Amino acid sequence: MIVQKFKDKLFALRKTLGFIYSRYTFAAVGRDLMFLLSTGAEIYGITVLGKFIDETAQILLNWNKFDLNTYLGTDSFYYLLILLLLWVVSQICTQGREYLYNVINENVWKDSQREMLAKVSGANLEDVEKEEFQDYLVFVPSYSISRITSAYDNFSTILSNVIRLVSAFVILFGTVGWTALLLLLFVIPETIVVHIRRKQLKDYRDEEVGRLKYLNYVQNLGLGISNFAELRVNNIYSYLRRKYKEEYQEFVEGLLNKLFSFHKDKTSFSIIGQFMKYGYIVYVLSVAVAKRLTIGTFKALYDYVDVIYSSTFRVINSLSLMFNNLEYTDEYFKLVEYKGFGDYKHGDVKLEEGAPSLEFKNLTFEYPDDPGTKILRNLNIKIEPGEKVAFFGGDGSGKTTTVKILTGLYRVKENQYLIDGHDIQELDRKQLKQKLSVMFQDFIYYHFSLIENVVISGQRKNVNKDLYKKVIEITGVKKFKREINLQDKSVLGKTFPSGKELSPGYWQRLSIARTLYRNKNIFIMDEPFTFIDDISARDILGRIFDFLGEDRSMIYITRSVSLLKNFDRIYYFDKGRVVESGTWDELMKKKGKLYTEIQNKDSE
């Protein structure tokens, strides 16, 4: 068990150092070289300082008066110049290391955040919704990313202090012999206790991931400007403040208890270690007296004792810190290397040009985190290229889940979802996404400029101006731009000071425009007219059909009957099943569930 944990740490160290040295080679190697150079300057400087003290002592003992010209030719002045030069080298290296550390640190944050975003964007909903994945998304930004740079810094500190330690030990060994090894033993108790306490802190944070997730949610909910009206008017802020205080108080109390134990034990064992170190200095003094060493030589030995003690502490402490940090960094690599079902199983089949056919064959579906509860049962649906079909049904009937399966966000059993006759798992992973443009029921209010709200879904950097003009005309965005005096570059929403808030209906029109601008072969729209009046919805839908033409398909999801007669085929969903399907006229003649529901509404 211990051996395996050690192997895991070494593996995490290899990944962490590989992340740093492969990406920021110049900065990392340059920083290490500066470590070595400053360490050499420090060790040599101790010897030079001892010689300076001895030469200066001779001047103080033998000179009756000070003569500057004479002093400039003495060894005392020579050693003083060397000390100044070594100090300059040390300062340049110290500031250079600090600058390069900032270079590495900022780039680590930039690259790791970008890779996290890339990982999420490339995942499937089934993977993102897993508790393990969600825990990574909470834990990694708060704890892991900063530890990548810290672990590298710990490694550099170990390397430089090993060289520092060995150099000082070799010099001290020449005077006091193997007793210099005692200094290493004096440090061990403190570093062991510190390591244990750090591990307890890490374990506590791991245990509290769920609470941290809850606190993040409460904070984001309370700080979201779009939530302000309901939270303020209904006095929900008081509840959020109370819950945040209660949960955070419990977290902080536990954390502070661990931190108190950490600092108490560190202080206690540090004092014990210093007592032993200063006892050893008395021994070094006795050796210096017995060997008739000069004051300068004793001062150098004193400094070498301190270097050995401090270097030993830094090496062992940095090892502890590094292994502790590696437990955090490993979470980052687990996230970016996370393999979901889309990573494990997909084929290489390429779809032909144009809209493909979509078909469900006896599709049954259960959410991965709730096996046993069937959300969809034995669905048999086929949508031919160019067809405009509607999925109709009440809340909880399975329409939106069907959309998520259609878009590949959830995994289904083999041969239950066919695209142009191919099982979805046989397709190259990007093939389906390249065919679809989707508007979800819970669409996003992007607090960017108006034009960005539309073209953000485009795959090209340059804006297709003709397409942009067409889709804002279709959706009525052009009209409300004029009515409320908006420009293409006007910022929307209240996140930024210059932003302008829109009504939900206007936001929904932008979402429809965004879906159309994507300009794909199949358009899926889940409740696209929730906030738009019936007359406007009918006009927009007509213009959308003209935009799509006869070759492109549309799947329209709704719980409203008002626009159903415009579609080629209607599928009536109820409790996860398709209970009837057909054209509007066929379903009215059948006088089944849809007909009955319309009659009931007319009679109300």
Image (tube, rainbow, N blue to C red):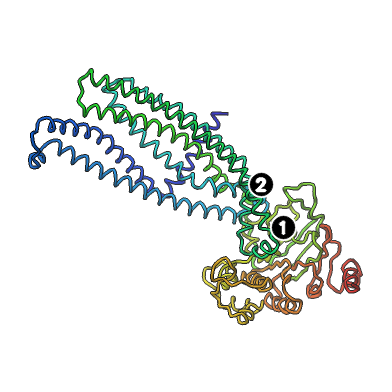
Q: Residue at x 16, y 33 (%)?
A: 56
Residue 228 placed where, x, y %? Answer: 64, 63
Q: Residue at x 18, y 37 (%)?
A: 79
Q: Quadrant of residue 454?
A: bottom right
Q: Quadrant of residue 593?
A: bottom right
Q: Which residue is mark 1?
A: 405
On screen, residue 438 versus residue 205, left or right, reads right
The crowd level at tag 1 (other Cα within 10 Å; few <14, some 14-19, many 20+) is: some
Residue 112 placed where, x, y %? Answer: 51, 51
Can residue 26 be seen at all in this image of the molecule? no
On screen, residue 527 versus residue 582, left or right, reads left
- Type of the residue with mark 2: Glu
230 or 439: which is nearer to us?
Answer: 230
Q: Height in image: 574 above or below 152?
A: below
Q: Which residue is mark 2?
A: 131
**Furthest residue in direction top, as rendered:** 290
